[in-house]
Image (cartoon, helix red, strand yellow):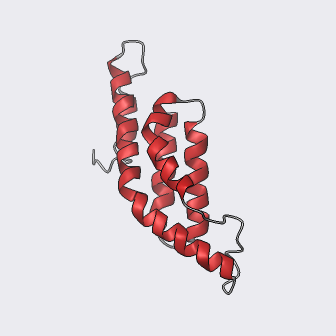
């Protein structure tokens, strides 16, 4: 699976984990996107709006989310969950834009083989 497809799959898998602590999920998503955008203009264009949304909320990612009665964690948990609930559509759009860019690369005779397109099928929810 090509790098961009692996990256998008990591994001998709992170968001699908409904049982995952919201603070941890928010932090993982934010870090994945930051790393994925580093040094890649196409990824920056696809995920830039999502990164801005994530950065706009004030989640204390250092709050002790393992301690149930921690007030800072409770506040951050609510903020993180609200943010995660609001970014799913933007995330899907970013993944589709990335896949579209990779498909355009296939039209370039110097790009990789058509197998790149197959790697995107499960990420985009397409059956083969």
The image shows residue 127, relative to residue 38, as above or below, that is below
- Please indicate, yes or no, whether residue 3 appears anywhere in the rendered image: yes
For the view shown, which residue lies furthest in the bottom direction?
69
- Left or right relative to 93: residue 72: right
Corner quadrant of residue 112? top left
| Total marks placed | 0
Whether residue 1 is visible, yes or no, is no
For the point 46% across and 30% down, the residue is 42
Residue 36 spot, x, y in % from top left = 56, 40
Pinpoint residue 19: horizontal percent, then vertical percent: 51, 73
Along the line of sight, the residue nearer the viewer: 56 or 33: 56
Q: What residue do we see at 27% from left, 44% from top?
A: 128
Q: Look at the picture and state if 55 lies above or below 43.
A: below
Quick check: 72 left or right of 124? right
Residue 8 locus on image (x, y percent):
47, 45
What is the residue that sits farthest to the top in this orientation? Answer: 109
Residue at image position (51%, 58%) is: 14
Residue at 41% x, 51% y is 91
Work out whether residue 49 or residue 9 is closer to the camera in this orientation and state it: 49
Residue 127: horizontal and vertical position, in percent? Answer: 27, 48
The residue sitting at the left extreme is 127
């Amino acid at each position: 699976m090509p790098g961009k497809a692996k990256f998008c799959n990591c994001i998709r898998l992170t968001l699908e984990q409904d049982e995952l602590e919201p603070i941890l999920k928010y932090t993982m998503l934010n870090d994945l996107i930051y790393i994925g955008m580093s040094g890649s203009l196409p990824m920056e264009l696809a995920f830039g709006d999502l990164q801005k949304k994530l950065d706009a909320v004030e989640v204390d990612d250092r709050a002790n989310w393992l301690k149930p009665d921690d007030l800072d964690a409770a506040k951050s948990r609510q903020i993180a969950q609200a943010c995660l609930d609001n970014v799913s559509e933007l995330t899907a759009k970013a993944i589709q834009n990335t896949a579209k860019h990779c498909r355009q690369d296939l039209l370039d005779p110097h790009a990789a083989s058509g197998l790149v397109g197959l790697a995107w099928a499960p990420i985009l929810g397409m059956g083969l």
